[in-house]
Amino acid sequence: MAVFDYVAIGPDGKQATGVITADSARAARKELRLRQMSPLEVNETSEKKSQKRFSRSGGSMGGNDLVLTTRQLAMLIRSGSTVEEAVGAIAGQAEKPGVRGALMSVRAAVQEGYALDEALAQQSKVFPQYYRSVVSAGLQAGRLGEVLERLATHLEKSRKLRRKLLSALIYPAVLAVVALVVVILLMVFVVPAVVEQFDTIGQDLPPLTEGVIAVSNFLRGSGIILIPLLMLAGWGMRRVFTQPALKLRWDKFVLALPLIGKLMRTVNAARFSRTFATLSGSGATVPDALVAARGAVGNAVFQKALTTVRRDVEEGQSLNRALRKSELFPGMLVHMVASGERGGNLPDMMGRAADYMEDELDNNATVALGLVEPLLIVILAGIVALIVLAIMLPILQLNTMAIGG
């Protein structure tokens, strides 16, 4: 199949340009008409020009695009298409320029003689390490179509897990922002208006009231500098945690927290299990699957533990004993790994463990959300009560003095 540049009138009546793959210019025009487009120009792009353009520009691909592309690739390869034909066909049908650019770059590399996993490595920002490891395992096992189908399922479940976590955090985050806005409005507008009435008292104000007034004055006079300071602090924290030693300490601290630590353990263990199950079920060896699974977890403590587990496995130790020795992975996971090793169905048992932990994570996130909401409300009520108390204290003090007088 060849690559063609085209200029056509789209269904909306506007002129559109792009690329399309087809056996001939005539076939390219026919494909455009099937897309309800009226071709004006269809010119074959030379391979060197195509490779230069797409390898230079690269491409980008969102999570949904990656899942869809993987699913389509699996379907085409299982139906008998070659890798080059499958990638070219998907690229030709891609509507987003970033997706089309990434896939055409991969197709150009395949045409040069690179294996698919090597071609994907040239677009490492689009196709992560564990993705390429799964593809490599599928190529070695001669079951690329089946492996890509497994990979697409894995990507879908990973995105589902990520959406669950984000959805659990949305409401508390909104509530926290609203609480912060309410407090700032009180400090900037309400407190100064009330404090003006205290100027005529001629008495010393309580320390709490003085503190609230000082905070209010700061927010009114210099509060705007907090925004760049917070942004700078966030940037600095991000740079600091790129240091391996500091990130390891922080991740260890997070895992030690009462509720959040349990959630993070479950998240990382589920990611490890799902990635390992996908790779080992695709024909990868246990050490190779551990390498890719290590890249799938984001916690530095888990990554360090998996490095040790891989070394122990390579030295002849069973996977379940290596996991148990780390004292980091849930007992249920270790038990299912042991059962899978005894029965010779380790990928299946790891997949079941991942399903169980993802369900547990969903339940834990619901419980955590139920605790965070009232906690934020109590904190907001406490801050508002503190401000009100700071305003009322001088009034009560004045009343006491009047009654005493």
Image (cartoon, rainbow, N blue to C red):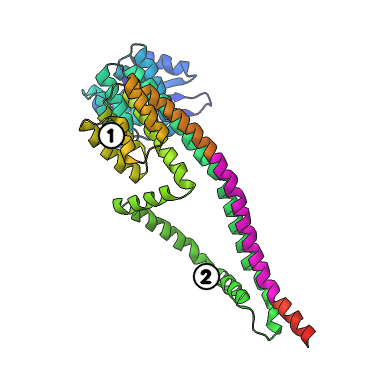
Q: Residue furthest bottom?
A: 405
Q: Residue furthest top?
A: 80
**Residue on which disc 1 sits:** 291
Counting residues from the start of the chain, the first of labels 1 and 2 encountered is: 2
Q: Going 36% across and 13% down the picture, which residue do you hit?
A: 78
Which amino acid, mark 1?
A: Val
Nearest to the observer: residue 42 or residue 397: 397
Give the structural element (helix, strand or loop) at label 2. helix
Which element type, helix, strand or loop, lies under badge 1?
Answer: helix
Instruction: Quadrant for residue 292, please give it.
Output: top left
For the question of whether residue 209 can be seen, the reply is yes
Residue that numbered label 2 is attached to = 222
Q: How many marks?
A: 2
**Residue 313 position (above or below residue 140):** below
Magenta-highlighted residues: 365-393
Question: Residue 11 placed where, x, y %?
Answer: 52, 23
Image coordinates for residue 256, horizontal then vertical, percent? 42, 50
Local crowd size for mark 1, using a 10 Å CA cut-off: few (<14), some (14–19), many (≥20): some
Question: Is the C terminus in the top left, top right, bottom left or bottom right quadrant?
Answer: bottom right
Q: Is residue 166 above or below residue 229?
A: above
Q: Main secondary structure of the magenta part?
A: helix
Residue 207 placement (x, y as % from top left): 60, 77
Q: Is residue 380 left or right of residue 83?
A: right
Q: Position of residue 121 (x, y in %)?
A: 27, 32
Quick check: is 342 in the magenta stretch? no
Q: Are marks 1 and 2 in contact (CB under 8 Å)?
A: no
Amino acid of disc 2: Ser
State the CA–CA distance, disc 1 to disc 2: 50 Å
Question: In which quadrant of the rendered image does the N terminus lie?
Answer: top left
Graded by Cα atoms within 10 Å as few (under 14), some (14 to 19) or many (20 or more), the crowding at tag 2 reads few
Residue 70 visible? no
Name the image quarter holding residue 267. top left
